[in-house]
Image: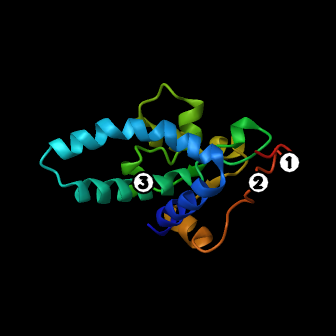
Amino acid sequence: LIGTTMFLVSEIRNLRRDPRVVRGWLWHIPMLVPVLAWVIWTPMPLWAYCVSAYVGLSLLRIRTFLEHRAHAQSRARSVIIEDRGPLALLFLNNNLHVVHHMHPQVPWHRLPGLYRRDAARFSRLNDGYVYRSYGEVFRRYLFRRKDPVPHPLWRGRAG
């Protein structure tokens, strides 16, 4: 929840400084018009829609926080989070992201079985980019950054 607020504040600041951010929002805002019209037309209050969208975005940020990383080998860029709890279900087992990338045709509900049958191989192929649970991720990164902000493999190719 905090990260989403920080993102929104940062985005407002960037609107004043970076014309690329302004251009991005100029593409985005017209797409909001039909969504907001639909929300206003339905019996759901606009505040309920905004709160739901905020919570949804906050949950999505948990999943996308470390779904991919910079790595020279593409097979080692996708994470494994071995968690079988409510977030795994909510994210449709996308916590087994490397399994999904290596077997995109497999339905989401079969990913855990596929992973269990060959966990050591998946871990080896993604160069050990494995966490036991989302709890481990929170403990490790709640108050410290995971990676440097500039892309570590794109030095000198900023912006």
Disc 1 on helix, strand or loop? Answer: loop
Q: Residues within 10 Å of mark 1 (few under 14, many from 20)?
A: few
Disc 2 on helix, strand or loop? Answer: loop
Q: Quadrant of residue 142?
A: bottom right
Q: Could you say which is closer to the camera, residue 139 or residue 124?
A: 139
The reply to whether callout 2 and callout 1 are in contact (CB within 8 Å) is yes
- Tell me if 6 is positioned left or right of 71 in this view: left
Q: Which residue is denoted by mark 2 in the rendering?
A: 150
Q: Could you say which is closer to the camera, residue 115 or residue 55?
A: 55
Q: Considering only vertical position in the picture, is 83 above or below 141?
A: above
Residue lying at 61% horizontally and 74% vertically, measured from the top left: 143
- Tell me if 17 is positioned left or right of 100 in this view: right
Residue lying at 48% horizontally and 62% vertically, measured from the top left: 4
Disc 3 on helix, strand or loop? Answer: helix
Q: Which residue is denoted by mark 3 in the rendering?
A: 57
The amino acid at mark 2 is Pro
The amino acid at mark 3 is Leu
Marks 2 and 1 sit apart, C-alpha to C-alpha, by 7 Å
Q: Quadrant of residue 74?
A: top right
Quadrant of the image containing the N terminus? bottom left
Marks 3 and 2 sit apart, C-alpha to C-alpha, by 23 Å
Q: Which mark is residue 63?
A: none
Q: Which residue is denoted by mark 1 in the rendering?
A: 155
Q: Position of residue 141 (x, y in %)?
A: 61, 68
Q: Could you say which is closer to the camera, residue 130 or residue 37?
A: 37
Residue lying at 59% horizontally and 40% vertically, measured from the top left: 98
Quadrant of the image containing the C terminus? top right
Q: Along the polypeptide, which appears first: circle 3 or circle 2?
A: 3
Q: Could you say which is closer to the camera, residue 94 or residue 70?
A: 70
Q: Is residue 118 among the parts visible in the rendering?
A: no
Q: Position of residue 9 (x, y in %)?
A: 52, 64
The amino acid at mark 1 is Arg
